[in-house]
Amino acid sequence: MESRTLNATVLDSLEPEICFLIRDDFYYGPDRHADICERKLVEKLIPPRLGQAFPSIVRTPEARGHEKELADYYWQIVSAARRHAKDFNHIRHYFWMRLWLSNATEQLSISFPWYDSLSEMRRFSDAIATDAVGDLYWDQDQGWGLDVKGTDDRLLIHQRDPDSDDTGLLVSVPRSAFLRKMSDAMQDATAVVARLTQEMGADVWTAYVREPPVWNRP
């Protein structure tokens, strides 16, 4: 633990950001890589205009109070899927979310590229919400790995490619402040998802959906 602390980038803060991924078209062609890459068989989508900083994502603070506008974007996807007879397995990626931990001053970020829903993010946030010292969290998937260790007052967060010799990114952050921010981010995201669920009649953001969702618009 001491050697890892010495090698870590020491940060004053790390900001958790939970967001909804936004796309500008709907692909309705066959599941062939060449066709998907060509993007010929697509319908244009009108992305939500919420004054967001980046067109490809809507962060939960940007969505708060604008859930209806965000739902209107998702209704375009549902309508397009119905027109082209695509079931939910073909469109679930349009409803994916993402979690990032970032520090603007150092221009660095830690990503969770395989966490598509709130339940996966909650698994991370719940595991680190403790005063235990030592190993707190570990996960690994397809070119990505993350582990978190705790000291009395710091969290050591290490992201790397387990298939590479690269040491990746190791940061040390103030423990209590980060845990408060992570808790707030999860609460905000949960509230936004609850409002989206009211708007659409089905929750496709909290966890992996195994049964076809029943929307509240025919």
Image (spheres, rainbow, N blue to C red):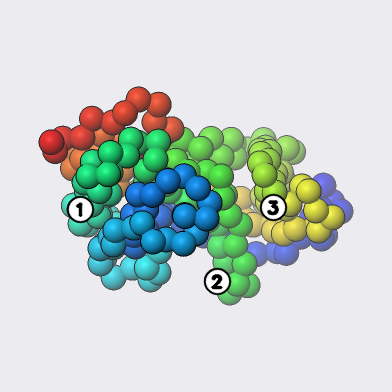
Upstream in sequence: badge 2 or badge 3: 2
Identified at 50% across, 48% down, the residue is 32
In the rendered structure, find residue 59 and report the number of the disc placed on it.
none
Circle nearer the viewer, 2 or 1: 1
**Residue annotated with mark 2:** 104
Nearer-N-terminus badge (1/3): 1
- Residue at 74% over, 38% down: 134
Kind of residue at badge 2: Ala
Q: Secondary structure at mark 1?
A: helix
Circle 3 is placed at which residue position? Answer: 159
Q: Nearer the viewer, mark 2 or mark 3?
A: 3
Label 3: which secondary element: strand
Q: Position of residue 53 (x, y in %)?
A: 38, 71
Residue furthest bottom as drawn: 105
The answer to whether 214 is drawn above or below residue 188 in the figure is above
Q: Position of residue 186 (x, y in %)?
A: 42, 45
Q: How many marks?
A: 3
Task: Give the vertical position of 63 relative to 144 (above or below).
Answer: below
Return the x and y of residue 91 as percentages of the image width and height.
Answer: 37, 43
Compare marks 2 and 1 and give the one earlier in the sequence: 1
* Residue name at image x 14 percent, y 38 percent: 217
The quarter holding residue 54 reads bottom left
Which quarter of the rendered picture does the C terminus lie within? top left
- Residue tagged 1: 72
**Cα separation between marks 1 and 3:** 36 Å
Q: Mark 1 or 3, which is nearer the eye?
A: 1
| Image quarter of residue 167 | bottom right
